[in-house]
Image (cartoon, rainbow, N blue to C red):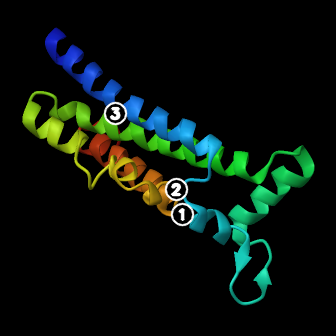
Amino acid sequence: MSRSEKYYYFISVSIVSILFIILYYYSFKYIVNSWTFSTAHLNYSTGIVRRGLFGEIMNFFNTNLNIKNEIFFATYYCFFTTINLFIFCFLLRKLIKIKYIFIFFLFNPALILFQIYDPFAYQRGETTIITLMLLHTVLVNWFLDNKIS
């Protein structure tokens, strides 16, 4: 990567990162997606009880460590969304030589910025699935580049 490409990459990724920092700040003050927050507490067959592994983990942190559910909820999604952002930007490094394609993928509202364009897409259950898909994409790229066998 040339020096100008590094600056271009850094500025572009910084703009996207600032957008996510604003979303993170907002998510610690308010529950951005109240539907997802409420489903962590509900089981549709029996009413208001903990639901699945995420609800159990959230309840564990609340009862044993006195961490509010809202704080745990926001921290969990900030953590996984940040990982997604890092992996996505890592994968885009290959496209920096084709600036228009790089900008298209980085600022595409259907990809990583979907959560910025539609705040109700933030803090949804697919966040961990997206993380796993991006990690698999990294592994496939490393395999195709003969970095792993």
**Which structural element holds mark 2?**
helix
Label number found at residue 16: 3
Q: Check if mark 2's residue and mark 1's residue have beta carbons within 8 Å.
A: yes
Of helix, strand and loop, which one carries label 1? loop
Identify the amino acid type marked 2.
Thr
**Which of the 4 image quarters holds residue 67?**
top right
- In the picture, which quadrant includes the C terminus? top left
Vertical relation: 58 (above or below) 68: below
**In front: mark 2 or mark 1?**
1
Residue wearing tag 1: 125
Pick the residue in front: 74 or 92: 74
In the displayed orientation, state which residue is furthest to the bottom. 45
Q: Which residue is mark 2?
A: 128
How far apart are labels 3 and 1 at the CA level? 22 Å
Going by the numbered disc 1, the residue's amino acid type is: Gly
The percent coordinates of residue 59 (x first, y second) are 82, 59
Q: What residue do we see at 36% from left, 46% from top?
A: 139
Indicate left or right for 78 with 46 as reference.
left
Q: Nearer the viewer, residue 95 or 42?
A: 42
Secondary element at image label 3: helix
Q: CA distance from mark 2 to mark 1?
A: 7 Å
Of labels 3 and 2, earlier in sequence is: 3
Considering only vertical position in the picture, is 119 above or below 103?
A: below
| Residue at horizontal 33 percent and vertical 51 percent from the top | 117
